[in-house]
Image: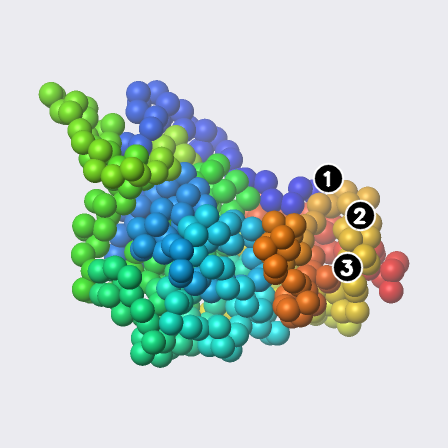
Amino acid sequence: MIPFSPPRIDDETVAEVTAALQSGWITTGPRTKQFEKDITNYVGCKTTVCVNSWTNGMQVLLNWWGIGEGDEVILPAYTYCASGNVVLHSGAKLILVDIDEKDFNISVEKIRNAITPKTKAIIPVDIGGYPCDYKEIFQIAKDASKQFQPKNELQRKLGRPIVIADAAHSFGASYAGKRVGAVADITVFSFHAVKNLTTAEGGAISFNLPTEFDHDEIYKEFCVKILHGQSKDALAKTKKGAWKYDVEEPGFKCNMTDIQAAIGLVELKRYQSNLERRKEIYRLYESAFSKKDWAILPRFKNDQKETSYHLYQLRLKGFDEAQRDQLVMAIAERDVAVNVHFQPLPMLTAYKKRGYQIKDYPISFNHYVNELSLPVYYDLNDENVQTVIDAVCQSVEEMV
């Protein structure tokens, strides 16, 4: 069976994790701090804080920015539930908008139509690793400054809705000559097991706010926030006589551990080779499926954007949801695992209960019903890729 997205764990990874275990330091420590610096250098942002998941990182971020009851946050309907759940937990009103016809990303025009004086944040989601239209999104955010109603000093300093990139898929992607992480005001990455770069579970918040913001202070503040509001972490308390600490606020508990960071350090060191292999797999898929009149190929590169090659989101012309689901089973019978990304939020019970209806997001639905995500990962060799191609083509052509 060709799996969908196994992590790249080998002797180098095992050796680094073993070294972390044997070092006597397994929670947040020197490896986590080094990983933060390496991420900052890689993406080109101003500072980075590592956390134990994308979800908790985004939750802390929304709390820090002061987003809560009475506020509105704009998000695409086409995303994973974590993106919406954190907004609901914040107490803010979740404003879902449809996606663009040309790809799987949020519609710029729909954002423009959804802006109100209560809009505090726009969260574009780089689905599959393909960056959103950030130039246009920032222009909308700047235009909204005329009606923006700040609630605290941070919001007053920015003077407009904040643009927070949901880059769970797009570590290593680029936009207008910059890597994702140095494009939005703030970017949140996921390092979950199925992501291009994994720490088993984990994530990072990369800050790239305007120069008026003190990023050194932001880093210090977040280190407190993600550790119960405690003024010293365990590493700081190892200094002689330094046991005493304060709790400055009722914070969260979502720090990354050195065991996780050990995996991440290895992953980041060889990340370019990972991207290159993923790109080669994309090209093989493109070459095969471009010859098929039933295939709608995903966007992955133009003069401003390049994907992280996280997902190859093939669409099947003329297929409905039931046919697509039947196809998933037919491909599995040929010992190839494929997936679907994603069920739009208004199709999920938790969101239907809150009044969201998929009929209000027709493009999201039309993209979902015939979407099929194919395996893309470093250890997938050319023979495996051909097996995937054959399984997809044979299964589709039995049905059309």
Circle 1: element type: loop
The image shows residue 25 at horizontal and vertical percentages of 30, 24
Q: Residue at x 82, y 49 (%)?
A: 330
For badge 2, the amino acid type reads Met
- Which of the labelled discs sits on residue 1, or is there none? 1
Mark sitting on residue 329 = 2
Q: Which residue occupies the extreme left position in the image?
A: 241
Give the amino acid at mark 1: Met
Total number of numbered labels?
Answer: 3
Residue ID at (29%, 37%): 250
Which residue is found at the position 33% from the left and 72% from the top? 148
Quadrant housing residue 311: bottom right
Between 328 and 270, the one lying in front of the other is: 328
Place of residue 227 in the rendered image (x, y in percent of width and height, measured from the top left): 30, 35
State the separation of the CA atoms marked 3 and 1. Answer: 24 Å
Badge 3 amino acid: Glu
Residue 89 visible in this rendered orientation of the protein:
yes
Residue 289 in sight in this render:
no
Whole-percent x, y for residue 346 in the image: 63, 58
Name which of mark 2 and mark 3 comes first in the sequence: 3
Quarter of the rendering containing residue 3: top right
**What colouring method underlies this structural image?**
rainbow
Q: CA separation, marks 2 and 1? A: 13 Å
Residue positioned 25% across, 56% down in the render: 46
Residue to which mark 3 is pinned: 321
- Characterize the local packing of mark 1: few (<14), some (14-19) or many (20 or more) Cα atoms within 10 angstroms: few
